[in-house]
Amino acid sequence: MTSIHRTRAIAALLIAAFAACTVTPRALHAADTPPGKVFRAGAYAQDITPQKFPITVNGGMRDHFATSAHDPLHARCIVLDDGSTQIAFAICDACMIPREIHDAAKAIASKATGIPTSHILISATHTHSAPTSTGVFQSDPDNDYREFLTQQIAAGIIQAYKQLEPAKIGWAIGLDPTQVFNRRWLLRGDSVLADPFGRDRDRVKMNPGFGRRDLMRPAGLTDAEVPVVALRAVDGDRPIALLANYSLHYVGGVPGDQLSADYYGAFARKMTERVDHAADAKPAFVAAMSNGTSGDINNIDFSKQRVTGRKPYEQIDIVADSVADAAMMAYARIDWHDWVPLKIAQRELTLGVRKPDAAELAAAKATVDEAHKRDPVLKTLPEIYARESVLIAAYPDTVDLKLQAIRLGDLGVCAIPCETFVATGLELKARSPLKPTFTIELANGYNGYLPTPDQHALGGYETWRARSSYLEEQASVKITQTLLELLDEVAK
Ligand SMILES: [Zn+2]
């Protein structure tokens, strides 16, 4: 057993131990239903595919444009109501969505439905083949699409609200350890790599490629859990909606000139085929796959041989099938409740911004000016990160992040506006007073990668200062602490 396999085996055991603790929710009894209260749910998948092409696509270091959509993009909306508290979810096929779009969509939806804005969770799936609504690297947002996206997310929540009907709710945890791999690899011995700022300090290489001899093992764990929350009508067995969660960055394999909802969309289609009576349900059944804590997790196993010859969308289909099978295993074990209490707590957390100092800023400006004399499109990582340094220098010294903790019966859900590392998600699962708990990342804003302090110390892509990674190095610790306080609040 190599050290890689040993690490994997230990990780698998840890994950199995987590699962064993969390698979069976503590049963709530019918006596828990307060008199006169009816549990209700409504769901609607609102199309958010752009109507104009070509359109900018983000997710890369350079901008590129799509000329068509291979499959539609959606904001998959679910509204829950326990008779006194209402909570709305909107899981959107987007790479990342900035705070201002979240806030504007919530304001519109709140005005129409009466659901407080603080009771709405909107998140991006992190498909890398969706229109740019946040400026990252050399992709600038399409302003018409930002406005369209805002209106469509709100419309989806409003329609889900209109479709509220008496419902049963249940949840369970599936497992799929086969599609998640930690993409940050530790280098052997004391070797280091240069970062884009010219410092020889990276002990980790993200997505290192195959066949390298300088790698030791992945620098972190994975999370195999596939939590599933399901809603079904009280009249008969018609399913209403299903909200799943999995800690996988995205899959990819989408041609550069096409938009796609990646495996998140494929999962939704496959669950509609698999869940009994879902395909012909009226109103239409809505399945949504939310992103867990996948800042350092991808779908490529660098410890094996490279898989070659996959056609576009083939890997998306393989992953969606595998995760849908795990979700169905969970679905079959669901313990249905007539009523559960809903609670949500939200808090703003102020965090510092890692800004360049005066000397770093002057050097960055010189690098960008020099590069721009040659070409308006920056080509090298030092040039691209120099431009990011200039842009980050204009940021305020601190930013406010919106955090949420939600209680659905005995189930906990956390929301973090970052590309959150898996260790943070595992810690929240382990320490939450609600069992099980899962986290939806890239929710309610976009504040870049969230490495833990020990991963910051190892360096690597996710730690390089840019608009995609700028929070203070203690950010994950402060976010975890705040979320545990919020979980305590809702668990009372
Ligand atoms: Zn990402």
Image (cartoon, rainbow, N blue to C red):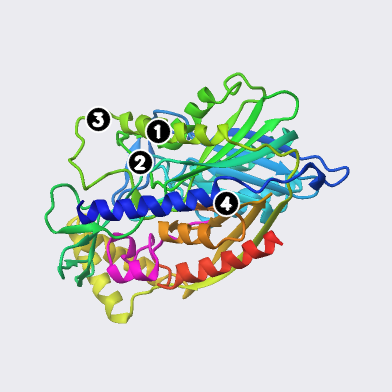
Residue beneath the point at 13% across and 48% down: 211
Earlier in the chain: of badge 2 and badge 1, it is 2
In 3D space, how far apart are the residues under numbered discs 2 and 1 (Cα atoms)? 8 Å
- Residue 95 visible from this viewpoint: yes
In 3D space, how far apart are the residues under numbered discs 2 and 3 (Cα atoms)? 16 Å
Q: Which residue is mark 4?
A: 436
The range drawn in magenta is 445-469
- Residue 377 visible from this viewpoint: no
Q: Secondary structure at mark 4?
A: loop
The answer to whether the residue labelled 3 contacts the one labelled 4, judged by CB atoms less than 8 Å apart, is: no
The residue furthest top is 280
The answer to whether the residue labelled 2 contacts the one labelled 3, judged by CB atoms less than 8 Å apart, is: no
Residue 478 location, x and y as percent?
Answer: 51, 71
Q: Quadrant of residue 188?
A: bottom left
Q: Secondary structure at mark 3?
A: loop
The answer to whether the residue labelled 1 contacts the one labelled 3, judged by CB atoms less than 8 Å apart, is: no
Q: Which residue is mark 1?
A: 322
* Amino acid type, residue under disc 3 in the picture: Arg
* Amino acid type, residue under disc 4 in the picture: Pro
Closer to the observer: label 1 or label 3?
1
In 3D space, how far apart are the residues under numbered discs 1 and 3 (Cα atoms)? 16 Å
* Amino acid type, residue under disc 2 in the picture: Gln
Q: In this rendering, is residue 15 above or below 239?
A: below
Identify the mark at residue 310; answer none if there is no mark: 3
